[in-house]
Amino acid sequence: MITLTQLGYLIAVERFGNFHQAAKSCFVTQPTLSMQIKKLEDDLGILIFDRSSQPIAPTPIGRLVIEQSRLVLSQAAKIEQLVNVTKDELSGELRLAVIPTISPYLVPLFLNDLQNQCPNIELSIEEARTSDIIDGLNRNRFDVGLLATPLGEDSLIEHFLFNEAFYVYAAKDSDLGSIKEIDDQALKDEHLL
């Protein structure tokens, strides 16, 4: 029988590329983690990891199993969320990724209110590049990402939060100085700082 714990171990090994770090991240001993993964491989009759490569990498079928494991664990976490919502309390872990260009300005605007209104939420915030956040969301490493949109990613749901004004400072006697509203096409051939 496949367990959620085993699926979590698979994802950890794939993430860290070795059994030692994966076991540490799961707060178990390496023999325990290795034994559970070996048991799962035996039960399924496949090799999930190629142990001869360094770092350890999933086999082709192992990649498919790991991707499905992410979906299963994500759906299992939603069961707890549903129960908490019916109790009118938000709790659990919220893994937020933010692009560095907005993190220092946006996060302080909501952090204290979130902690005061939802004291049972364990919030972790990570700054990352857009491509890493998209990958992390698709791999269930992050729950939410704050990014510049539109992203055009079919696998993600985007919610618009705000528009940031973009200002052009130009000399009064320049061509741009006489235009009241400037679109990006007007800036195409300009020398910008």
Image (tube, rainbow, N blue to C red):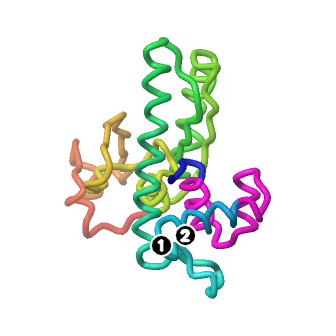
Q: Are marks 2 and 1 in contact (CB under 8 Å)?
A: yes
Secondary structure found at label 1 = loop
Determine the CA span between mark 2 and mark 1.
5 Å
Provide residue 77's location: percent of width, then percent of height.
49, 37
Nearer the observer, 159 or 175: 159
Q: Residue at x 60, y 27 (%)?
A: 121
Segment colored magenta = 6-32
Q: Amino acid at mark 1?
A: Gly
Q: Amino acid at mark 2?
A: Asp
Q: Is residue 24 magenta?
A: yes
Provide residue 37's location: percent of width, then percent of height.
61, 64
Asked whether residue 101 appears in the rendered view, the answer is no
List the residue tagged with mark 2. Answer: 42
- Residue sitting at the far bottom: 52
Q: Main secondary structure of the magenta part?
A: helix
**Which disc is residue 45 wearing?**
1
Figure check: 157 above or below 20 = above
Q: Residue at x 38, y 40 (%)?
A: 164
- Residue sitting at the far top: 88
Nearer the observer, 4 or 137: 4
Q: Residue at x 47, y 28 (%)?
A: 81
